[in-house]
Amino acid sequence: MIFVRDKGRMCNNILQYAHVYAWGREHGRSTMSMRFAYKYQYFRICHTAWHNFFAYVMAKTLAKLHLLPVITFEPDDCNAAELEQQMLRHRNAIVEGWHVRFYDLFLKYKQDILHLFAFDDGIEAAVRRTMTAACPQPTVTLGLHIRRGDYARFYGGRYFYSDEQYASLVEQFAALFPGKLLTVFVCGNDPNLDRDYYQKRLPGVRFCFPDGNPAEDLCLLSQCDWLIGAPSTFTLVAAMYHDRPLYWVEDAKTPVTLDLFDHFDHLFRQISKYNSFAIMDPPRVVPTSASSARPVGRPSLSCGVCKKHFFFAQITPPKYVKKRTAVEINLHCGTPIVAPQCIFSCTAVQIFR
């Protein structure tokens, strides 16, 4: 038995487990998701064998006592081939880590994965009621995922878009379907979203804010004709269910065209470029003039464009980081500078990876 565990959110867990499940199917090995044994009880997998709290506690205890080997697919440049050999050698093991990837096997067993993660009947019924009430007549449906919260820090806030930007995206999308009624289902994690703004800005578009639980939001998005959102596994998994076209908004200033929409089978191979180590709080940056005194012992640099001097406070690396590499990035004047696998929007930052 291969027990799969991780600490990410729901859709991260779906994708991570699905990769290992597909590998297990290919090699005749049973698998069990420790996450779905006790959490996110919205799917068919949660009611299958081994997916219960007792099995979760048993596997966790055996690993803690070093009676069950733990195979960790971290960091992003880990030796995946060697780790797979460990999976083959051990009859029972825990597999963890965001970077476990078996893309071809995932696609081979995709229908079985969709069957495992089919929504419970209650979730499906709630979504049908919401969509029926919002769409009493034929309409084009757009699922808009507004990710806030942790995205204020993810990649330095690069994908933390404003209401104005999201409304503009909807306005441009609506223009692609002249003469057709558009209904937009808005899901996200911002409790302070200015809902009135959207309807006032676009009175010809019908907006629906369903306020569902995570599974209801995911199910609803999966039923929409089109999907738009910042890069996120939430919209990616939503697109997976019914192969809906998805536009991951890399730059909100890019004009919206249908060519920007893509499908799951291609997009899910792109998630490796959004590395989890980029999720970190921005440093406390204090601008000063070039002649100003600065605290002793704090690293500093000058803006290559405006020549202003900056220093930044010491940053404590995330506790899961074992090796540290410092990279200085200057974005003071708003021009992105790309470091290895990272883009940050803070003035000066140390990246730990």
Image (cartoon, rainbow, N blue to C red):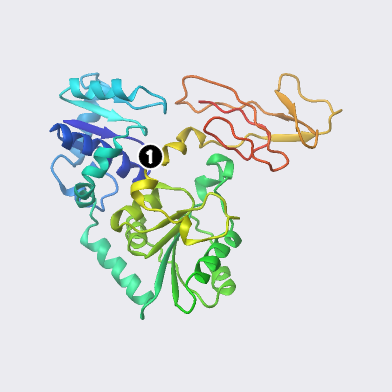
Q: Is residue 64 left or right of residue 342?
A: left
Measured as percent of width and height from the top left, residue 208 is found at 44, 70
* Residue in view at x 32 percent, y 34 percent: 101
**Most foreground residue, 333 or 50:** 333
SS at mark 1 in the image:
loop
* Residue in view at x 49 percent, y 51 percent: 230
Which quadrant of the figure contains the N terminus?
A: top left
Q: Is residue 232 left or right of residue 329?
A: left
* Residue in view at x 69 percent, y 43 percent: 334
Vertical comparison of 98 with 175: above or below:
above
Vertical comparison of 342 with 174: above or below:
above
The answer to whether residue 297 is visible is yes
The residue furthest right is 291
**Most foreground residue, 191 or 144:** 144
The residue furthest front is 259
Residue that numbered label 1 is attached to? 8
